[in-house]
Structures are given as structure tokens and as C-alpha cells.
Image (cartoon, grey):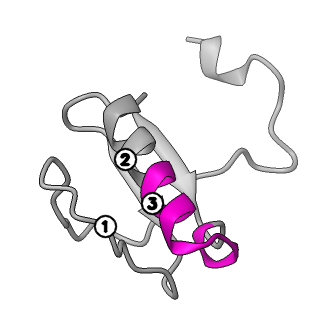
């Protein structure tokens, strides 16, 4: 996987379950893939295959008034 979003998910899990979920997520990511956690969550697991990186805060979404197929025109 290229991207796994677990924002505000791990907060509701017990420590052992949280650790298992993080290990599974780490194994599912391709090299260079991203795991995104909520700001209130911490890893609380020893995962040497993951590194902390800082990325920009820009998030893209499809505009509400976007015309279907507009990206294909041209």
C-alpha cells in the first residue's frame, strides 16, 4: 500500500492491539509508503522499519463543482 490512514483510530485500542495493528500496517506499506496517525496518537511500538518524516499540510480533494472527465480533456 502507498498510504494507510489511521487518524484517531489507535486511541480506542488497548496497547497490545495497537501494537499488532501498527506492525500489520508497517508490513503492508511499500517502501516509501506513508502511515498517517492522528496528532494525539503516538506509535508506542518499536517499529524500526518506519521513520518519522515531516510532510506539508496541503491536502487535495476533488472540488465540489468539478466537471466529470475534465482531467481527460486536452
Magenta stretch containing residue 44, yes or no?
Answer: no
Q: Secondary structure at mark 2?
A: helix
The Cα–Cα distance between marks 2 and 3, rounded to whole angstroms, is: 14 Å
Are there few (<14), some (14-19), or many (20+) residues within 10 Å of tag 1? Answer: some
Rendering coords of residue 64 (x, y %): 86, 50
Rendering coords of residue 19 (x, y %): 43, 60
Front-most of residues 64 and 52: 52
- Answer with mark 2 or mark 1, whichever residue precedes in sequence: 2
Q: Classify residue 2 as left or right of residue 12.
A: left
Boundaries of the magenta span:
10-21
Mark 3 lies on residue: 36
Are there few (<14), some (14-19), or many (20+) residues within 10 Å of tag 2? Answer: some
Q: Secondary structure at mark 3?
A: strand
Mark 2 lies on residue: 23
Residue 45, which numbered label? 1
Rendering coords of residue 1 (x, y %): 43, 28
> Residue at 43% of width from left, 40% of height from top?
24
Are there few (<14), some (14-19), or many (20+) residues within 10 Å of tag 3? Answer: few
The Cα–Cα distance between marks 3 and 1, rounded to whole angstroms, is: 15 Å
- Answer with mark 2 or mark 3, whichever residue precedes in sequence: 2
Q: Classify residue 29 as left or right of residue 72.
A: left
Vertical position of residue 30 compared to residue 50: above or below: above
Furthest-right residue in this view: 65
Vertical position of residue 30 compared to residue 35: above or below: above
> Residue at 55% of width from left, 11% of height from top?
74
Rendering coords of residue 72 (x, y %): 62, 12
Vertical position of residue 44 compared to residue 50: above or below: below
Amino acid at each position: 500500500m502507498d498510504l494507510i490512514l489511521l487518524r484517531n483510530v489507535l486511541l480506542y485500542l488497548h496497547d497490545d492491539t495497537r501494537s499488532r495493528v501498527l506492525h500489520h500496517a508497517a508490513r503492508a506499506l511499500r517502501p516509501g509508503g506513508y502511515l498517517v496517525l492522528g496528532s494525539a496518537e503516538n506509535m508506542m511500538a518499536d517499529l524500526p522499519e518506519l521513520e518519522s518524516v515531516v510532510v506539508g499540510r496541503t491536502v487535495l480533494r476533488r472540488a465540489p463543482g468539478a466537471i466529470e472527465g475534465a482531467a481527460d480533456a486536452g
